[in-house]
Amino acid sequence: MHHTGTLFVGKKHRPTVDKDSAGAFRLELVLVDNLGRNPHTGRDEKESYRVRWSGPEAQAFWATHSDALKTPGTPLHVELERLRALPGPLAFPPMPELVGRVLHMKLLPHRASSTPTTPEAATA
């Protein structure tokens, strides 16, 4: 399965950097898809993605954006392949974790604050 969309760096798991079986650089991230509020339960729903990216493009991205990738909530535009659902870590409510391989990843700007600022507040 192929997936393209906006995901966010998760809070609970730090990025992992190592080498794959062929000795190439490998980056692993846990990302979150914010699905919105469930009208039946009133809870915000999220989906977890564990993604791996190998090779020189991943290494260059890590070298440039490692600080942002360590910051929870950082938005990313990702293109994934070989997406599959596996039993996730222990969580309540229980839910699967989606696992995939990164084809392309791009850092997105954070959304502007929803609180309007006034010139007086900026100079105070």
Image (cartoon, helix red, strand yellow):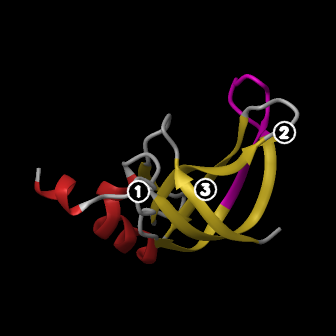
Q: Which residues are magenta?
A: 87-100
Work out whether mark 3 precedes mark 1 in sequence or the reverse, and give the earlier one: 3
- In the rendered structure, find residue 75 and report the number of the disc placed on it: none
| Residue 113 spot, x, y in % from top left | 41, 56
The answer to which image quadrant residue 91 occupies is: top right
Q: Amino acid at mark 2?
A: Pro
For the point 20% across and 63% down, which residue is it? 119
Element under disc 2: loop
The answer to which image quadrant residue 107 occupies is: bottom left
Q: Mark 3 against mark 1, which lies toward the viewer?
A: 1
Q: Which residue is mark 1?
A: 113
Within-10-Å neighbours for mark 2: few <14, some 14–19, many 20+: few
Report the number of discs.
3
Q: Which residue is mark 3?
A: 51
Q: Which residue is mark 2?
A: 39
Q: Which quadrant, please, contains the N terminus?
A: bottom right
* CB atoms of marks 3 and 1 within 8 Å: no
Is 91 one of the magenta-colored residues? yes
Disc 3 and disc 1: Cα gap in Å? Answer: 28 Å
Within-10-Å neighbours for mark 1: few <14, some 14–19, many 20+: few
Extreme-right residue of the structure:
40
Work out whether mark 1 precedes mark 2 in sequence or the reverse, and give the earlier one: 2
The answer to which image quadrant residue 97 occupies is: top right
Disc 1 and disc 2: Cα gap in Å? Answer: 25 Å
Within-10-Å neighbours for mark 3: few <14, some 14–19, many 20+: some
| Residue 18 spot, x, y in % from top left | 42, 52
Work out whether mark 2 precedes mark 3 in sequence or the reverse, and give the earlier one: 2
| Residue 44 spot, x, y in % from top left | 70, 38
Element under disc 1: loop
Q: Amino acid at mark 3?
A: Val
